[in-house]
Amino acid sequence: MMSAFSSISLLLNPRRVALLISAIAITTALVTIPAIAQTSAPKSSQDPPPPPSPGDNIRYGYAIHQSIDLGGHIASYSGNDAMYDTLVNFQSGPRILDQSMEMIAVDPAHAPLFDTLSTTSFGYGGDPYNVTFLNFSKGRIYDFHSSFRRNRQYFADDLLANPLIPPTSTPFVPILDTPHLYNTVRRMTDTSLTVAPLSVVSAHFGYFQNVNQGPTNSTIHVGAEALLTQYWRVSTDVWNGGITWKPLRGTSVGFDEFITHFKGNTHWQLTGLDYQLSNGTPVSLGIDLSSVWASPCAAPFTPNGTVNPTCNGFLSYTRYAPTRTLFPSEQFHFQSTSIRHFTMNGRVLYMGTTSHLTNFNENFNGLDARVGNRVEDVTGSANARRINVNADYGATWQVTPKVAFNDIFDFWYFRQPATNVFTETDYAGTSMLQPPGAATTTTTPDYQALNQKTKRNTFFVNWDVNPFARLTLGYRYSSRIITDAGGDFIPIHENWSLFGIVFRPTPQLRANFNFDWMYADNSFTRISPRQLQHYVLRTSYKAKTWLNFSGTINILEDRDNIQTVNHLAHNRDFSFSTVIVPSEKWSIDLSYSYDDVFSTTLECYTATPVVEGTPQGPPVCQQAGLPLQSNGYYNQPTQYGSIGFVFTPVKKFHAVAGYRMSDTDGQAPPINIRQVPGSLQSQYQTPYGTLAYDLTPNWTWKANYDYYSYGEGTPIGPTLPRSFRGNVYTLGVRYAF
Amino acid sequence: MKPSHWGAWMRRALLCVTLIAVLPGFWKTGRVNAAATSQQAVNAPQNAAAAATTSNYVGAETCATCHQDQVKGFEGNPHAKLALEHGGKGVTCEGCHGPGKAHVDSGGDATKIFRFTTATPKQVAERCLTCHVGDHPNFERTAHGDALVGCTSCHSVHKPEAQTALLKASQPTLCYQCHTDIKAAFAEPFHHRVDEGLIKCTDCHDPHGTFQPQMLQLSATQDAICTKCHIDTVGPWVYEHPPIKTEGCTMCHFPHGSTNPRLLTRNNVNSLCLQCHSPSMNFTAPGTPSFHNQANQYQACTICHVQIHGSNASSIFFK
């Protein structure tokens, strides 16, 4: 008889564990007769519908409840308008603040199209977010769900992609706004129809559309870095259809087809033609105009103030890259609880994607002084394939009423070969005042590939120690192999230990603690963890019917502490919340959170001038011409606090008031002498208040006040300050009928 | 078979047999008691095969004689469709609470019927998953199921605040009751518009579980759920930024909210990029060229490397 120790050592081998489990499963399956419960329904009559209540609005056989909130905003703000629009973006004007309608059939047996219908909307008339939900269903026949969402995405944080022009430049042309401004509108429509949802065979169909369009700013480097206007127009259409069959009680199998079509019609053109050549031709010198950097050249201007024609510059630029991608995928899925004490589910999916960029067209007219080109024309095409094969299987075996074995196996594979071929015709020249010279044409094909195969198995045991406590122990093994066209072969093997405990001594008190520990023998990037520990403690306590506490401690530690990397990171979050509802007349909720984001990673770079105290890098960095080293220190401690009051002294009057603040006081030593902390030292405050008075049972008057305040620490940097203050007053009336 | 191999095989077989033999020791003798806890009333034994006979069902009209509050307005509840089962002769109340005859005959003894308010989360999940397991087959194996967060922790059939999915409270308020850390994330200056009502937690997560980590959903293109909205990043590209596909979007972005623009994990783009693009002996990511002076315009990496999520035309993501 082997020792207990050698028994345990046997079990530490994953392959042997899998073999053992298979043996137990097969043995148990042979001796267990699947018990499929066959309960017959009582022959009672269908429940009659209750009579409509006196207050119901009964029309066309439906009890209808509707409400509409009409009103408007009065918005005033000071400081950085662009940042207000980025973070808030509520403007003045009338609005449909809210709308809802619910229709419930009085007698479903005689309702023609639907038994229930509900729809809600908000934000129409000018708010940055407009949303509509529409759901309706008819008994056993169908269920329909849909949504429409429109989102105005305006982004103009002036530090993003900002070159930080040195003030000592001559001339000094600071970039006060971000060169990568976004001003797009995203419209998303989501529909889902299930036919015969309760039947043995049911079908489902869905359609999703996402259209994202609008003008943004972008940049391109051709000698200089020019500002472009980018006309966004990307969209996806997703069609899906599927069928689910329930051959046995507790078992279902199904097939789904997903077809996604992506259409990209974004194009770019030059903007910012702020200067002139001596012949009056408008020209752009780009956004990096600085004599300190000799950008776009050492002497960009002539003595008479016109642009030096031998300097890097843009006379015109356009780029078109229409892309079409088709993602058809087939998925088979199943689920079963028909075997007693054994549940399982899984899926297998295949997707074969094709992407085509058929008519790439880029035209540059100006001067790329480094290579001596006046005009560059690029045409070409690109094609990419992606093959996905995914399979997942999960099973739970309730071995005893107190012990359950769980296993999840995942196989995720994609390979992505891609090719392109571009023909570039360069016209020589050394001056923008001279026409383009001799042409040189080169055609360059390229082949790339990226592949990843992941196999992962998670096994864990739940032990319900008693009705108040559960213990979970588990092990996960993951094998990942990444390869590419360059011949890289990167295997990564991860071993995880999983531990969890749930403690529920009373229905009012619950605490659960989870600990995951991971070790990997390799990593793909310098900041991918080779070691990871994740601790999560969540508690909730309902001390009284009117008093609730909840809290979370969430600590994630990871590192990739190999030579020349020394990556160390953590995210430690401590938060709690309490809700006090002593009566229907008033309540308070309080929340606090402290979140500490930290990381260090050895980084090598070059900089002139150098930030004082910068150390020299290791030999591998010196050899690469990057002699300076930073430990990449980044510390972002954020505190969040909120308090909210709800006050209803009499039935007709409601008041809400509250205050929220998010404060970050972080440190990240700059590696550029002009870098500023920016958002790393910032504060965002949003107090609010609402009054509502029921004028009559159907009419409610409402007033709302929101205050928005954003500020950053100093120095601001060579841009506009990013702080703002905003007041948004909302007045409205609600009519319910 | 060599003696050493025979011995190893025998030891493995003996271990298997021993473990199988030990298993019955975990079984408690006697009938399983569905709700036996010291603080909870003991329910009548719920042997499905024995109790589920037609004579034990009383019908919703009988339930309504005492439970008017629960019956009123129930016709709008999705569970009212239970009445349509079995050729239109199904039951509603007893479809979830079990046969009510013993409860009625005893004059309303609450211990003689299944009560969701006093059952354990596991018992509640077993009952709800009897019908809903087809939609939520992963639940028991996920963080919520494993942590005994039962169905009635989030759902209320009789008193939902949100009719969609019969939630006890609307999203995200419901989720914030436990996920207090996430509430703070969405209050940071740059955040996904969850508190504003544009996005719901369930747009990205399936609280009933998926095969993905963190109960995340996948897009229809089998990419991270982020690409459902951020379709410009979906690719596939000739020139991929490989970690996006292999490690995920959260290598560079915080998913919920951030103090930094674009929800980046660092306030300065160059320090984010240099974390990976510094010379090292064991990694394929190229280091920055020696002329990328960080004291001038090269510190703003994305001025030139604009198409950072992938490109069909430039291996260095210029276009």
Image (tube, helix red, strand yellow):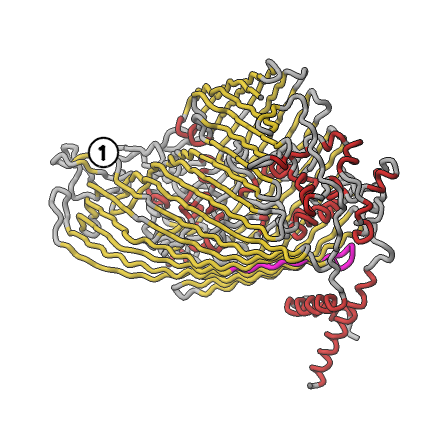
User: Is disc 1 placed on a helix, strand or loop?
Assistant: loop
Quarter of the image with the N terminus of chain A in it = bottom right
Quarter of the image with the C terminus of chain A in it = top right
Amino acid type, callout 1: Asp
**Residue at the disc numbered 1:** A274
Q: Position of residue A101 (x, y in %)?
A: 56, 28
Q: Position of residue B274 (x, y in %)?
A: 42, 49
Q: Chain of mark 1?
A: A
Please name the residue shown 73% across and 28% down the image: A546
- Nearer to me, A311 or B49: B49
- Nearer to me, A177 or B104: B104
Verify whether residue A142 appears in magenta: no
**In this rendering, position of residue B233 left or right of residue A278:** right
Q: Which residues are magenta?
A: A390-404
- Nearer to me, A671 or B303: B303
Q: Quadrant of residue A13?
A: bottom right
Residue neighbourhood size for the residue with mark 1, other residues' Cα within 10 Å, grouped as few (<14), some (14–19), many (≥20): few
Verify whether residue A392 appears in magenta: yes
